[in-house]
Amino acid sequence: MIEEVQCDIVTAMLNEVRLLLGDEVFHAAVEKVLEAKLRIDWGGQAVYVKKVAIDVHARRRAIRAKYDGTNRRQLQLEFGISRGQFYKDLRSGIDPAVESPISLERRLRRR
């Protein structure tokens, strides 16, 4: 039977830093101090880690610029987002003083 090894996020991050910098730069003493600080500051919390560091506003502008009313699935694949996130991004650029979400959806369905 294969034994499954559990690794928490702090250990995983420290391992990645060690691999990237090497033992010569990332000394064991520095690692211990950093690990203690991370565990004190973040221990016990539910932390969200984004898949990628993105500029959400730029993605939303790009989606609105590229959306033609028929290419939702293509844009979801291109930006790596769900259907719900797609529509959230699409609606995010609506200025309620200028256009309501209902009028935008109706206008997009007519295309």
Image (cartoon, rainbow, N blue to C red):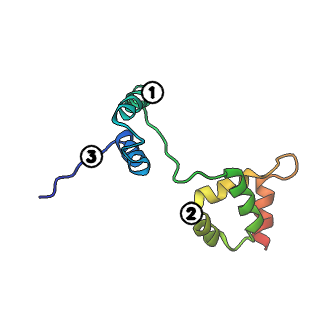
- N-terminal of the two: label 1 or label 2? 1
Q: Which residue is mark 3?
A: 6
**In front of the other: 107 or 90:** 90
Which amino acid, by three-letter code, is at mark 2? Gly
Question: At x 60% / y 56%, what residue is drawn?
Answer: 85
Amino acid type, label 1: Asp
Badge nearest the viewer, 3 or 2:
3
Give coordinates of residue 46: x percent, y percent: 43, 36
Is disc 3 placed on a helix, strand or loop?
A: loop
Quadrant location of the N terminus in the rendered image: bottom left
The mark that comes first in sequence, 1 or 3, is 3
Specify few, some or many for label 2: CA neighbours under 10 Å numbering under 14, 14-19, or 20 or more.
Answer: few
- Residues marked 1 and 3 touching at CB (< 8 Å): no
| Label drawn at residue 79 | none
Q: Are marks 1 and 2 in contact (CB under 8 Å)?
A: no
Instruction: Pick whichever of labels 3 and 2 is earlier in the sequence.
Output: 3
Residue, disc 1? 41
- Near mark 1 (Cα within 10 A), the count class, few <14, some 14-19 or many ≥20, is few
Q: Secondary structure at mark 1?
A: helix
Give the residue at the far right of this rendering: 98
Q: Disc 3 marks which amino acid?
A: Gln
Q: Position of residue 107 (x, y in %)?
A: 81, 65
Distance, label 1 to label 2, CA atoms, is 31 Å
Q: Which residue matches tag 2?
A: 80
The extreme top residue here reads 40
